[in-house]
Image: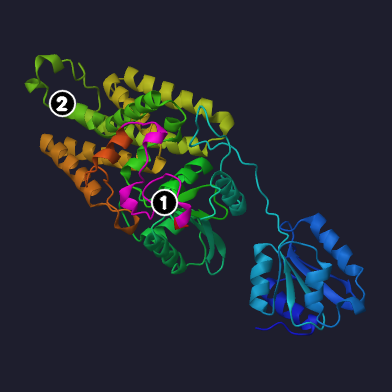
Amino acid sequence: MKVDKYLRKNIEILDRELGISKSFDIINREFQIGGKTASLLFVDGFAKDDIMLWIMQQLQRVKREDIVPNAVKKIVEKEIGYLEVETTDRIEDIVEKVLAGPLVLLVDGICEAVIIDAREYPVRAPEESDLEKVTRGARDGLVETIVFNTALIRRRVRDPKLRNEIFQVGSRSKTDVVVSYIEDIANPDLVELVKSKIKSVETDALIMGEKTLQEYILGKNWNPLPQAKFTERPDVAAAHLMEGHIVIMVDTSPSVMIIPVCMFHFTQHAEDYYQSPVVGTYIRWVRFFLMILSLILPPLWFLLVQYRDILPEALKFLGPKETGTIPIFLQFLILEIGIDALRIASIHTPNALTTSLAIIGALLLGEFAVKVGLFVPETILYIAIAGIGSFGTPSIEFAMAIRLFRLILLLVTGLLGIYGFAAGILFVAIIFLLTKSFGGVRYTWPLIPFNGPALSTILLRKPVPEVRLRPDFLDTRDRDDASPDPKQQ
């Protein structure tokens, strides 16, 4: 629908669309410009008060002869000395822009509207992510405002080839989504695939930000293994951009989505690179060990206890002297559910009460359950070690997947013994082998298909100058991270 030359008619149409007379936060401020009635439309709380005041003062001083003929052109070029200004002649554009934050100026007798991007979203200061803390390194983290996030990343990647393409997703929410990539590094086919997937999303709103978008991009999937990596650290996002990954940012979300990735991306942490190579390698090996323990320790111990009679003498110490009132198998299941119950309770517990929750959960329940004979100390010990292994996993999504696999291993081991344990391990291996990341990338790279140099880079935190080649599964345009040849630009 076109903008009418009569201001009152335009306001009536916009009142029906935006609810100006019903919504207290949709402001219609009328004033005079050169003897003509004008309206400034905006959402209260989205616009900068000082900028609006300056614009109105500037426009109210304008005389009629200063803006006729070609009133809109003269207002934009001579009277509004602001950076981000554009015009439109469509009502739909006005509705979209007002709800996004910019101001819209309508003048009686003129069939165009002036859009002034003087928005200022409510925002918190960048601070370190609680999920990705480091002992050294940057302390700024991503926030809920997408413009701030693009600035934090561009501050680290001042490459003129860095592209931040913006889209709107959600027929009602009109959520801003940015696809970020380095043009002469990222695989163009993957970039186009990501953009086409985003454009094809049909939904009212991205309720849970980038997580909702991920499920539309990656499709319907009951596989617990995460196929996209999330981070709240701008330095981690920048590092993945330099490798050739694609970063997807969603407005109102303090984390970004990185695709495509393989399983080893969930085993690395920024802390590895803020320490020396030797220390970083040691930390990485400890983390691998904890992750393996979190998967197999409880079911493996339970299996060995079941077959204690045939164990070698060196392993005869395994197993409790007294089994307790509840069978060991049920003890493990109850403790697994109990660990999750504590984790859920801790999320919903105010910070002031978390210490009390820890005392109740870790000390009172565990200690008294052993004293009354319901549990044996060994089962609590091994579940606690597995829990520490889960907390030592950098990605909470990957840790939860391992947690589910551990529960499956416990169930089949308890029901079928050694055959169940073997079948469970085989089932988990098949899930890893069959899983593919975005774009058909093998989840097990560089183990399968085998890539020795890349695998050594994962197992060892090598000095940064030694890691020259980008991951080959990304099929990047530029394989070497050396400075590009200016002649090829």
Q: Residue at x 37, y 52 (%)?
A: 260
Q: For the stretch drawn in magenta, what is the main secondary structure?
A: loop
Q: Is residue 279 magenta?
A: no
**Disc 1 target residue:** 245
In the rendered structure, which disc, 2 or 1, sits on the residue that comes first in sequence?
1
The numbered mark at residue 304 is 2
420 on left or right of 211: left
Disc 1 marks which amino acid?
Answer: His
The numbered mark at residue 176 is none
Callout 2 environment at 10 Å: few (<14), some (14 to 19), or many (20+)? some
Q: Secondary structure at mark 2?
A: helix
Q: Residue at x 53, y 50 (%)?
A: 159
- Whether residue 327 can be seen here: no
Disc 2 marks which amino acid?
Answer: Leu
Q: Residue at x 68, y 71 (%)?
A: 18
Return the residue nearer the eye: 486 or 282: 486
Residue 217 position, x and y percent, is 40, 60
**Residue span colored magenta:** 460-487
Residue 332 position, x and y percent, is 27, 31
Tell me whether circle 2 and circle 1 mark residues in contact (CB < 8 Å). no
Q: Quadrant of residue 476?
A: bottom left
Q: Secondary structure at mark 1?
A: loop
Q: Is residue 484 above or below residue 199?
A: above
Residue 57 position, x and y percent, is 89, 63
Return the residue nearer the eye: 355 or 161: 161
- Of discs 2 and 1, which sits in the foreground? 1
In the image as oriented, which residue stretches furthest toward the front? 487
* Gap in angstroms between the C-alphas marked 2 and 1: 44 Å
